[in-house]
Image (cartoon, rainbow, N blue to C red):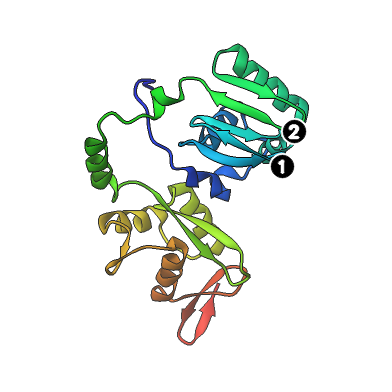
């Protein structure tokens, strides 16, 4: 696997429970999470009851906040930050109320030299890049839905419902139409799966689907 080049990751990935909700974080995940927590522009922020300017590539946090966020002990957080500083990856400045983290060489990785080319490339990649749609279920809970979903996620969903849908055929179908439903971007692939169930004569009873035949149901 090549280690050359770089990719862009949207901060919204942190809001996705399926991808980002498991704890404790691995060190690599913690490092990426830290990068996404950094300010991308200078900003004024109240820290410890006082107004402070947090510069680009910096963030002011508490050890407790990171411990809760990553599922680590405070000692492990402190050791990790000290290791980053020793490796020259970050500068750590702490007092009784806060810890200011400055990522080394932040601008080297974040600056875009050719904005026009980047925007053009992003427009071309829009249909191919997975996006996350935030939906609310009937209980008022926020649910983040990744589209297109990974094959394993569709397999797990279909197996749990016993709906007889071929996950690969499902993904191939929507890949072919750009994950559109009519003229609109798909918002919920699971809802699309339930539509397939109805078309195939399956009815979900809360435990698994059953196939309707000749006025009755076959499990």
Q: Identify the residue under disc 2.
A: 97
Does 113 sit left or right of 186 as displayed?
Answer: left
Bin the neighbour count of mark 1 within 10 Å (Cα to Cα): few under 14, some 14-19, many 20 and up.
Answer: few
Q: Split into 4 quadrants, where in the image is the C terminus?
A: bottom right
Q: Identify the residue under disc 1.
A: 49
User: How many numbered discs?
Assistant: 2
- When the figure is inspected, residue 32 is found, relative to residue 201, above or below; the finding is above
Quadrant of the rendered structure where residue 5 is? top left
Q: Earlier in the sequence, mark 1 or mark 2?
A: 1
Does 217 sit left or right of 179 as displayed?
Answer: right
Bin the neighbour count of mark 2 within 10 Å (Cα to Cα): few under 14, some 14-19, many 20 and up.
Answer: few
Q: Identify the disc placed on residue 33.
A: none
Q: Are marks 1 and 2 in contact (CB under 8 Å)?
A: yes
- Residue 54 x/y as whole percent: 56, 34
Q: Nearer the viewer, residue 68 or 193?
A: 68
- Residue 41 x/y as whole percent: 46, 37
Q: Secondary structure at mark 1?
A: loop
């Amino acid at each position: 696997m090549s280690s050359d080049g770089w990719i862009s990751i949207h901060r919204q990935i942190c809001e996705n429970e399926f991808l980002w909700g498991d704890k404790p974080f691995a060190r690599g995940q913690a490092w990426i999470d830290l990068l996404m927590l950094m300010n991308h522009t200078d900003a004024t922020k109240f820290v410890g009851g006082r107004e402070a300017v947090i510069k680009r590539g910096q963030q002011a946090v508490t050890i407790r906040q990171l411990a809760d966020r990553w599922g680590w002990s405070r000692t492990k957080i402190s050791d990790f930050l000290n290791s980053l500083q020793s490796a020259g990856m970050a500068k750590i400045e702490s007092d009784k109320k806060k810890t200011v983290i400055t990522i080394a060489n932040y601008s080297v990785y974040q600056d875009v030299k050719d904005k026009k080319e980047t925007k053009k490339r992003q427009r071309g990649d829009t249909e191919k890049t997975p996006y996350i749609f935030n939906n609310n279920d009937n209980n008022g809970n926020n649910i983040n839905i990744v589209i297109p979903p990974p094959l394993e996620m569709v397999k797990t969903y279909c197996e749990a419902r016993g709906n007889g849908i071929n996950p690969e055929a499902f993904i191939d179908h929507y890949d072919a139409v750009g994950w559109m439903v009519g003229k609109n971007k798909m918002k919920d692939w699971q809802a699309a799966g339930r539509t397939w169930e109805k078309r195939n004569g399956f009815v979900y009873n809360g435990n698994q689907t059953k196939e309707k035949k000749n006025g009755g149901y076959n499990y």
